[in-house]
Image (cartoon, rainbow, N blue to C red):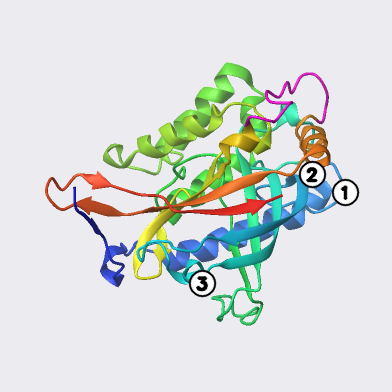
Amino acid sequence: MPVCFIPYAPDVEIDEPGFDENVQKVIAKTEEYITGSVTTGGTGQAVRDAHAKGYGLVRGEMEILDGLPEEYAQGIYAAPGKHDALVWFSNGSPHAGADARLGHARGLALKIFDIGGPTLLEDEPGSRAFDYNPINAPVFFCNTVQHYLFILGLFLRAGEYFADGKRGRHRFYREYVTGKGTFSEDDWAWEEFLTFLIVAQRPLVNVLLSAYTTMGAVRHGDYIAKVRIAPDPGRAATVVERRMDVTSAEEVFRPALVSELRERPYTFDIQLRSCAIASTSKNGASRAARTRCRC
């Protein structure tokens, strides 16, 4: 069936009311949390407002394959070749501590080096680096910066809510959906809440066995795509420590990661899922191209 890939155009993006103002509020709240975490975090060190705990930083090599279809050979994928890379595994929580106390969201940050062209970062225009920051869930847990603003506040205090047992959980859920009572009933964040539940129920497996996605669609050269970093099936089959028992020790994810990579190299496939429509039925369609990152 013929497939028509959707080209990028500025009008595919939705202008969110109050976007710039809400972004500044998020930045201010983040800075306030990080500054205060030196005394409130229990470690005597500043921690991030998300992905505060790292499991390991790994050297890798990313290979962009030759012969990709034109719709996939966009941007950094237009030129086949190999690049040095760094891979950082983390937990999505804004807290550091025993693995059993943290949530099920985990991240894989990929930094690719020796990429030509200027970056969008004003303070690093010539860094020649390209970054992905996906997590182990297919969809993000909020749709707007306004949603993120109140959800961020809930996440930063999640430990206080859940320490209060069933009553605390229910209060967390209610304030998540209603925006702490600020949303009209028609605007309650049901989709965001259901996505949060999906993330909260991700399986506790070795970080090498999870697939990580950009969650939102991003511009991909002349087109639009989501990016997924998924374990190579052959490599994944060799992983010995698969399920993680967070009750067995304070640290389980990092030792399992180190143990595996000391014994054998590992490969992830970077898959591009382009936005497309089937020209006859108008049903959604997608295809994936792969590059390989070897850790």
Q: Which stretch did the figure color magenta?
A: 237-251
- Contact check, label 1 and label 2, Cβ < 8 Å: yes
Q: Which of the labelled discs sits on residue 44, or is there none?
A: 1
Q: Which of marks 3 and 2 is in front?
A: 3
Q: How far apart are marks 3 and 2 (CA)?
A: 45 Å
Q: Which of the labelled discs sits on residue 79, or is there none?
A: 3
> At 52% from the left edge and 27% from the top edge, which residue is drawn?
171
Name the N-terminal-most of marks 3 and 2.
2
Q: How crowded is mark 1: few (under 14 residues within 10 Å), some or many (20 or more)?
A: few
> At 59% from the left edge and 67% from the top edge, which residue is drawn?
81
Q: Dot 3: what SS?
A: loop
Q: Dot 1: what SS?
A: loop
Q: Nearer the viewer, residue 84 or 128?
A: 84
* Amino acid type, label 1: Gly
Q: Which residue lies furthest to the right in this view?
A: 44
Q: Nearer the viewer, residue 121 or 276?
A: 276
Q: Where is residue 88 in the image (x, y as percent from the top left)?
A: 71, 51
Q: Which of 224 and 186 is in front in this view?
A: 224
Q: Position of residue 144 (x, y in %)?
A: 40, 53
